Amino acid sequence: MRIVIAPDKFKGSLTATEAAQAMARGARSALPSVEIEVAPMADGGEGTVEALVTATGGTYHSLNATGPLGKPVQARFGMLGDGRTAVVEMATASGLVLIPADARDPLSTTTRGTGELLLAAVAAVARRLIVGVGGSATNDGGAGMAQALGFSESTIAAITGMPTNNPPGQVYGWTKDT
């Protein structure tokens, strides 16, 4: 018999890899001769980079990026085993998990760090990009990401239809009263 174990994370408890390994241990203890294949999955949020890097034999690349509140955070992206495809997880730099519950305000958060991860992936010779957008702490429509990628404030406002309250050089943020 062959069993494929392919869970997503158990948010707040186990990563997808940890969950899959625990399930595999349980299956092996009940059925010692069973063939088990472990394939952690992800839904585009936390764990997406880990699942794809693990599945393809890729590598991780870490950097400091702008967090959802505009402060630096340690973030990472993965380069898949083909050496040409990078996977970026929005939750790593712009995620809800990076903000304490009492400080969560999507009107004052940014996706700028996600754009910084994309730039780093391209600098690392990625020719294809996969972006997992789950787990985001923001609702800026990717405007902070666009700013990091070099789009002007006026272009971002025209695309999103949302006004900004930024002095030149400030991390992207929305006005609360518009």
Image (cartoon, helix red, strand yellow):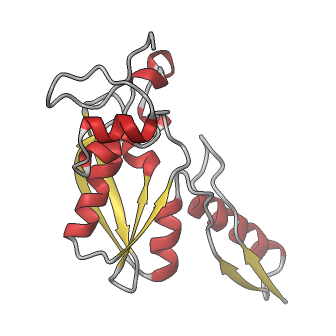
63 left or right of 15 in image: left
Q: Residue at x 31, y 41 (%)?
A: 155
Direction from residue 105 to residue 156 in the image, left or right:
left
Q: Position of residue 90 (x, y in %)?
A: 44, 49
- In this rendering, the count of numbered labels is 0
Quarter of the view holding residue 147 = top left
Can you say whether 72 is above or below 69 in the image?
below
Residue nearer the viewer, 148 or 36 = 148
**Residue 9 relative to residue 103: left or right:** right
Please provide percent x and percent y for residue 145: 34, 46
Q: Is residue 42 visible?
A: yes
Q: Position of residue 89 (x, y in %)?
A: 44, 55
Residue 85 picture quarter? bottom left
Q: Quadrant of the C terminus?
A: top left
Seen at 37% across and 24% down, the residue is: 163
Q: Nearer the viewer, residue 105 or 40?
A: 105
Give the vertical position of 173 relative to 92 (above or below).
above
Residue at image coords 35%, 61%: 77
Q: Is residue 113 visible?
A: no
Which of the pair 63/37 is nearer the observer? Answer: 63
Image position, residue 48 (x, y; %): 52, 61
154 or 91, nearer to the observer: 154
Q: Is residue 157 above or below residue 81?
A: above
Residue positioned 36% across, 44% down in the render: 93
Q: Quadrant of the N terminus?
A: bottom right
Q: Residue furthest left?
A: 169
Left or right placement of residue 99 versus residue 6 in this view: left
State which quadrant residue 152 falls in.
top left
